[in-house]
Amino acid sequence: MSEESDLYFRQIAVGEMANLVYLVGSRSTGEALVVDPAWSVDALADQAEADEMKIVGALVTHYHQDHIGGSIFGMEIEGLERFMERCPGPIHVQKLEAEGVAKVSGIPRGEFREHSGGDTIELGGVKIRLLHTPGHTPGSQCFLVEEEGQPSQLVSGDTLFLGSCGRVDLPGSDPEQMYESLNGTLRKLPDETLVFPGHLYSEEAHSTMGEQKATNPFLRVANLDMFLQFMGA
Ligand SMILES: [Zn+2]
């Protein structure tokens, strides 16, 4: 990042399932959004406060408990409910994911701001583009953080991991959609785009699209049939 960048961006490891959450905002306006507030909502809000940033909403990558809170394997994970108590501002979800987010979080669907792929949210000089990337879940979305004169940053949720991709053998998963999301939507992003995944399943915590295109086997399959074979589908 150069001196002139308006971007406020923090990657924070939370919880017991190697989740990575993000604070994304504009230094000039002092406003930030939290991507997937879960596990330690207060710690995230405290971090933003310590950075003199005001949280103005949440972005949801998808409806799994480790990203939005809820009950899994007999464990209660804190998430969107705590977020709504502590922080003001809308919870941005993909419209195809809204029902699942409501079901898992226990928050009525009417509380969410529902989006289509391609929608953008602007904070100062920072634009966040919502990319619909189904496959892991029907309404999975990635966030492309754009700023004039800077390389973009992709917050890739459980769609693209460094060297791998999200599971497609879960309820609501679709391997064909995952192929299209990875090799259609995400592969088109410029090589210099920085990649920030939803879990730390790799040695490094971030990468570039160029590196992923060159080394991630799930971005290197020649066609859908090969991808499905590779996924064991
Ligand atoms: Zn997931």
Image: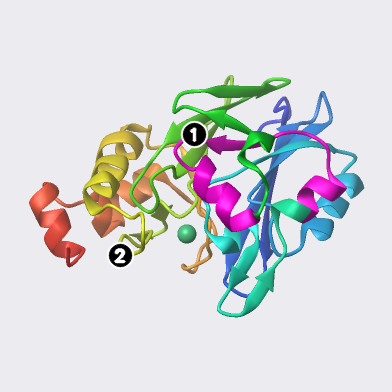
- Residue plotted at (21% across, 48% down): 176
**Residue at the bottom extreme, as displayed:** 74
Q: Which residues are magenta?
A: 82-105
- Confirm whether residue 8 shows in the render: no
Q: Is residue 98 magenta?
A: yes
From the top left corner, tell me how far across and down residue 167 is, in percent: 35, 62
From the top left corner, tell me how far across and down residue 85 is, in percent: 85, 49
Q: Nearer the viewer, residue 110 or 231?
A: 110
Confirm or reject: label 1 Cβ below 8 Å from ligand 1. Answer: no
Which tag, 1 or 2, sits closer to the chain's start? 1
The relative height of residue 118 versus residue 214 in the rendered view (above or below) is: above
Disc 1 to disc 2: CB gap under 8 Å: no
From the top left corner, tell me how far across and down residue 113 is, in percent: 63, 31
Q: Which residue is mark 2?
A: 169
Q: Nearer the viewer, residue 63 or 191?
A: 63
Q: Is residue 144 magenta?
A: no
Q: Nearer the viewer, residue 20 or 204?
A: 20
The crowd level at tag 2 (other Cα within 10 Å; few <14, some 14-19, many 20+) is some
Amino acid identity at mark 2: Asp
Q: Quadrant of residue 169?
A: bottom left
Q: Which residue is mark 1?
A: 95
State the CA–CA distance, disc 1 to disc 2: 22 Å
Where, quadrant-wise, is the C terminus in this rendering?
A: bottom left
**Residue at the left extreme, as displayed:** 225
Disc 1 element: loop
Q: Quadrant of residue 74?
A: bottom right
- Residue plotted at (73% across, 27% down): 6
Amino acid identity at mark 1: Lys
